[in-house]
Amino acid sequence: MCAPTASHKDFLLMEKVIAAHNSQNWAEVLELEGRMEELIEGRDDHTREAILRMFLQAHRQTSMRLPPLHSLFQGHTLSIFRFQERRIELLGSMERFRDQGEEIFELANSILILNTTEEFGVSAFGKEEAARHFQTARDLGAAHGFFSLECRACLGLGWLKTDEGRDEEAVELLQNALAAAKLSEAEQGDTEELRVLPSLLDALLNTNALEEVEPLVKRYREAGEAESRRQRRMNYHYLKSFSFSARLHEVLLIYTPRVGNPFTLLCPCIPPRPIASATGSTAPECGQTHSLTLPLSPGTREA
């Protein structure tokens, strides 16, 4: 009996990897990772990309079962990072720009994970590198009309700006994300704006842009309500919209002038010129404000 040729061995190895992948036996896929280069060598771009994707998915699925700061999780994330870099280059040469942009976006998230510690959070280097990849994904999405990608990339950039305390810049990025979300929703039927609105509302409240908050709270609640109807259960975002209403109410209480009597209102002066009162005092000139005390109900004593 003849010994199997090198190409036949490669074929059998490929069949083994595909079978393990299709059965979602991620441990077996990872066991074969050491022989990945044998599989890739001499293959066309489409086959090489498919092989990289199988091993990439195996690492992702395995890492999802581990705590984020676990050493094994970090090891899988590092492997994911390496596979992502190779796959991004391949997808570009194949002109699969949507998939390339999605992988660049995921690469930015991998960088954030790899540069996060429990004590210090995300390092400055991690933020800088992640921002660079988010911006690349945003540019790619804008250039090709991939609105969902552009939305999520702007959202990632907005998160980083918020984390640095640069709320004004975050608001601009998150507003761009919201604009792209509406186009994405029309394109794919997704509810991307539910991802954006909580972060945008946070940033607007931090910058005291209260005139923009109220209509967005209403928009957030309506989007959450629509999602609740679609899912046939109470949606998290619908409930969260009420917390933003409460926060807005608290801020308005802080900035609203306080008066001694709860029945006292601040209202503009109506008379065009001072008018003498019975006591000889005059009413304020037009343009000023004065306190108007409403009569108390019978039997009620003023505090």
Image (spheres, rainbow, N blue to C red):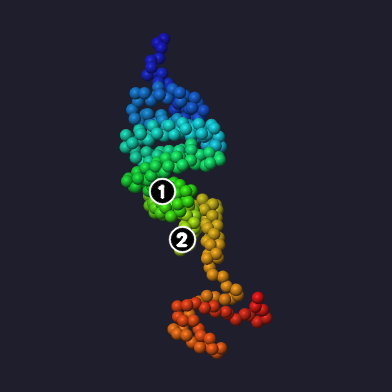
User: Residue at horizontal 52%, vertical 36%?
Assistant: 64
Q: Position of residue 136 (x, y in %)?
A: 37, 42
User: Residue at horizontal 39%, vertical 32%?
Assistant: 86
Badge 2 marks a residue whose secondary structure is: loop
Badge 1 marks a residue whose secondary structure is: helix
User: Residue at horizontal 57%, vertical 76%?
Assistant: 264
Q: Position of residue 187 (x, y in %)?
A: 38, 50
Q: Which mark is residue 209?
A: 2
Seen from the viewer's position, the closer of residues 300 and 6 is: 300
Judging by the rendered image, the residue that carries numbered circle 1 is 154
Seen from the viewer's position, the closer of residues 79 and 118 is: 118
Visible in this render: residue 229?
no
Task: Using the rendered view, name the quadrant where residue 35 is placed.
Answer: top left
Seen from the viewer's position, the closer of residues 227 and 287 is: 287
Q: Nearer the viewer, mark 1 or mark 2?
A: 2
Quadrant into which the N terminus falls: top left
User: Residue at horizontal 62%, vertical 80%?
Assistant: 296
Residue ranking furthest to the front: 280
Visible in this render: residue 118?
yes
Q: Residues within 10 Å of mark 2 (few under 14, many from 20)?
A: some
Relative to 63, residue 269 above or below:
below
Quadrant into which the C terminus falls: bottom right
Relative to 225, residue 45 above or below:
above
